[in-house]
Amino acid sequence: LSIIPVNTLDESGVDICGDNIPKEAYYPTKSSLNKSLAIARQQGKSPRILLLSHPNNPLGICYPSNIIQDCIDWCRKNRIHLVSDEIYAGSVYRSNDFQSTLKL
């Protein structure tokens, strides 16, 4: 088992200087997913799973529906399984912040 991280900060296009990094900088994008896929393939690895931690820990960021849908579409296109770890969903106090991947 090899884990290839998806570096969302580098591909976000958001200025990440200072302490106030906007939550959008942590959203996975097709660009960040493609870059990680290319790195994995350069290393001779064939990714089979994208693990999406939503809401993530420790920041508790909930991804908007369009970001989750982009991940679903990317996985379908690349024939990669999507595993959505939603264990912290019960800790979200604003009900409109969390959208389960299963509902999309």
Image (spheres, grey):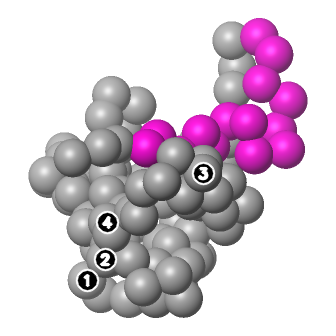
Which amino acid is tagged 3?
A: Gln
Q: Nearer the viewer, mark 4 or mark 3?
A: 3
Dot 2 surroundings within 10 Å: few (below 14), some, or many (20 or more)?
A: some
Q: What is the spatial separation of the Cα atoms under label 4 and label 3, in whole angstroms?
A: 17 Å
Name the chief secondary structure element in magenta.
loop
Residue 81: x %, y % from top left = 31, 77
Q: Secondary structure at mark 2?
A: strand
Marks 2 and 4 in Cβ contact (< 8 Å): yes
Q: Which residues are magenta?
A: 4-18
Q: Secondary structure at mark 3?
A: helix
Residue drawn at 29 percent across, 87 percent down: 103
Q: What is the spatial separation of the Cα atoms under label 2 and label 4, in whole angstroms?
A: 5 Å
Q: Mark 4 or 1 closer to N-term?
A: 4
Q: Residue at label 1?
A: 102
Residue 101's quadrant in the figure?
A: bottom left
Residue drawn at 32 percent across, 57 percent down: 51
Q: Mark 4 or 3 closer to N-term?
A: 3
Q: Mark 3 or 1 closer to N-term?
A: 3
Dot 4 surroundings within 10 Å: few (below 14), some, or many (20 or more)?
A: few
Which amino acid is tagged 1?
A: Leu
Task: Pick the residue in front: 77 or 57.
Answer: 77
Which amino acid is tagged 4?
A: Ile
Q: Residue at label 3?
A: 42
Residue drawn at 39 percent across, 63 percent down: 47
Q: Secondary structure at mark 1?
A: helix
Q: Residue at label 4?
A: 49
Task: Pick the residue in front: 6 or 97.
Answer: 6
Q: What is the spatial separation of the Cα atoms under label 1 and label 2, in whole angstroms?
A: 13 Å
Residue 66's quadrant in the figure?
A: bottom right
**Which disc number belongs to residue 81?**
2
